[in-house]
Amino acid sequence: MSEQSRVPPRQRVVKTFPVLSINGTPEIDIAKWRLKLFGLVEREIELTYEQVRSLPVVRKEADFHCVTGWSRLGDVWEGVWVRDVVALAQPKPEAKFVMVHCYDGYTTNLDLQVLLEEGMLVWAVNGEPLAPEHGYPLRLIVPRRYAWKRAKWGRGA
């Protein structure tokens, strides 16, 4: 696939990783950080950063597109599949959508099936740990969705 065919209409390719956030970058104490899964699940869970990192690790190349008009191509993301995390909570059959909550107060919603098929919780990009302004400790990556669905500083869903 050609590079240009991977770029959505009216987007430009950038080499740097722009920083966009609604409420600035939160300061997160990793010792106190928790990821909570609740709602339409059989079992509500709360995971530490170490528990998330102990799940099977995956690396995936995926382009990154922002609704503000820029794209980055070929980034390699490292983390865990969302489906592996969600399986620990066992979603109920009636669960169809997910609301993702972030430490800065941001929320975004996603179709559960899309999230299970392609979602990742990542802690590194291109072999480097995520910088705080890009979502450390965990950022949600959903490759076929624009960046406003790729929530930074995840804390629960």
Image: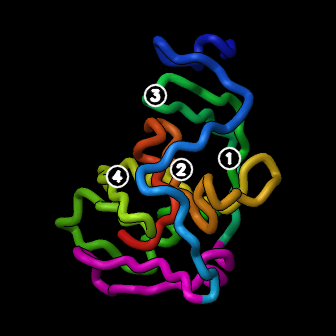
138 in relation to 45, above or below: above
Q: Tag on residue 141?
A: 2
Q: Are marks 2 and 4 in contact (CB under 8 Å)?
A: no
Q: Tag on residue 113?
A: 4
Q: Are marks 1 and 2 in contact (CB under 8 Å)?
A: yes
Q: Residues within 10 Å of mark 3 (few under 14, many from 20)?
A: few
Front disc: 4 or 3: 3
Kindly identify the residue that appears in the image at 41 percent across and 86 percent down.
45
Q: Mark 3 to mark 2: distance in Å?
A: 17 Å
Q: Mark 3 to mark 1: distance in Å?
A: 24 Å
Quadrant of the rendering where the N terminus is positioned = top right
Type of amino acid at the residue the image marks with label 2: Ile
Residue 37 on the magenta segment: yes
Q: Which residue is mark 3?
A: 68
- Is residue 130 visible in the rendered image? The answer is yes
Q: In the image, 124: left or right of 21?
A: right
Q: Earlier in the sequence, mark 3 or mark 1?
A: 1
- Bounds of the magenta segment: 32-55
Assign a secondary structure to mark 2: strand
Q: Mark 2 to mark 4: distance in Å?
A: 14 Å
Q: Mark 4 to mark 1: distance in Å?
A: 19 Å
Q: In the image, 43: left or right of 19?
A: left
